[in-house]
Image: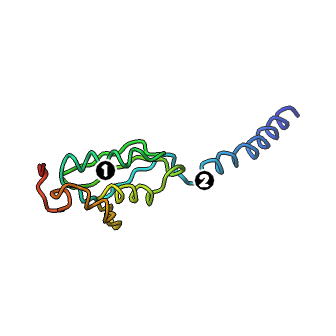
Amino acid sequence: MKMKNMNSFFSVMLLLVLPAFVFANNGIKKTQVIYIQTSAVCEDCKAKIEDAVKQLDGVKNADLNLKDKKLMVKYSAETVSEAQIKMAISKAGYDADDVKADASSLTNLPKCCQDKNSKPSCH
């Protein structure tokens, strides 16, 4: 009789605890990684873009590779969205995938940084 009661107890506990684990995760990873194509051309561009993105709540890391102009961003999707990250890059004066650079911010950049085809050592 005791064994039957123990099995019933564990079955009830499993039914109570399992849904908590399933619903707690709800499909959103706590940390996500995205790669964004930018229009950066030099170390100054790299610093401006990384700083703009790192200021956003929820961004854990941002690292721009100047060879391929791709920005790697680790972020919390619960706090910040991919669209917000791209908007921060745009407002800094740079393209972010399909989001074009904010026109007024772009004109405030040094001339060589405005030209996507400039050499990496434009300053």
> Looking at the picture, which amino acid does disc 1 mark?
Ile
| Residue 44: percent from left, percent from top | 22, 47
Residue 44 shown left or right of residue 15 in the figure: left
Residue 42 location, x and y as percent? 18, 50
Foreground: disc 1 or disc 2: 1
Which disc, if any, is residue 26?
Answer: 2
10 Å neighbourhood of mark 2: few (<14), some, or many (≥20)?
A: few
Return the residue found at the far right: 1
How far is the residue under mark 1 from the one under mark 2?
32 Å
Residue beneath the point at 19% across and 55% down: 110
Q: Is residue 64 left or right of residue 119?
A: right
> Which residue bears the numbered disc 1?
49
Q: Which mark is residue 28?
A: none
Write the residue at 86% across / 32% down: 2
Q: Nearer the viewer, residue 103 or 53?
A: 103
Q: Nearer the viewer, residue 104 or 86?
A: 104
The spot of residue 57 in percent (x, y) is 48, 45
What amino acid is found at the position of numbered circle 2 in the picture? Asn
Element carrying mark 1: helix
Q: Residues within 10 Å of mark 1 (few under 14, many from 20)?
A: many
* Residue 118 point in image, percent of width and height: 13, 58
